[in-house]
Image (cartoon, rainbow, N blue to C red):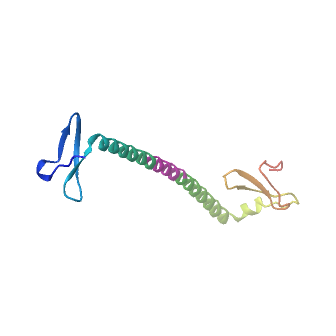
Amino acid sequence: MAKKSLTNGISSGFGDIEVIGFLMKDRTFSPVLADDNLKFLKQLLKVNEEVNNKQSSDLRSAELELKRKTSEVQALNKLVKAQAEDIKSLKSNPEQIKSTNSTKDEDTWDKYADEDGKLFFYNKKTKDSTYEKPANL
């Protein structure tokens, strides 16, 4: 390969091919085809774009998950506030508590929500649970 000294310049042309020199150990320049460098830079740019797209996609997914979790927390906060108001109301009206308790020997069902938020009913007496509304409710 042809070598160029520092005094002769960095780049030169060989026919239609333009070359760029790189500094070597012996402080002389070795011509490297500009086309190879261009291909390498295009590949590097493509990899960089793929990484950026992946990071953007991951960020969008994380933002959506955060919004979903925030909505869940807000719904739970509303539920807690409503239950706190119910407790205050029951404390201020103890006769209301007595009227809701059954004095008969019948099944007593309570409403609960499972992990997915689906409503189910629990029978205190028989310790049964069901997703279908019991007939005596």
- Report the magenta residues as a range: 56-68
Name which residue lies at 22% across and 45% down: 20
The residue furthest top is 16
Left or right placement of residue 123 versus residue 84 in this view: right
Q: Position of residue 130 (x, y in %)?
A: 79, 52
Q: Position of residue 17 (x, y in %)?
A: 24, 36
Q: Position of residue 8 (x, y in %)?
A: 12, 48
Q: Position of residue 55 (x, y in %)?
A: 44, 50
Name which residue lies at 66% across and 52% down: 117
Depth check: 19 or 133 in front? 19
The residue furthest right is 105
| Quadrant of res 13 | top left
User: In the image, is residue 62 part of the stretch drawn in magenta?
Assistant: yes
Q: Is residue 15 above or below residue 31?
A: above
User: In the image, is residue 10 part of the stretch drawn in magenta?
Assistant: no
Depth check: 61 or 23 in front? 23
Q: Is residue 26 above or below residue 46?
A: below
Left or right placement of residue 29 versus residue 52 in this view: left
Magenta stretch secondary structure, dominant = helix
Name which residue lies at 27% across and 42% down: 33
The residue furthest left is 7
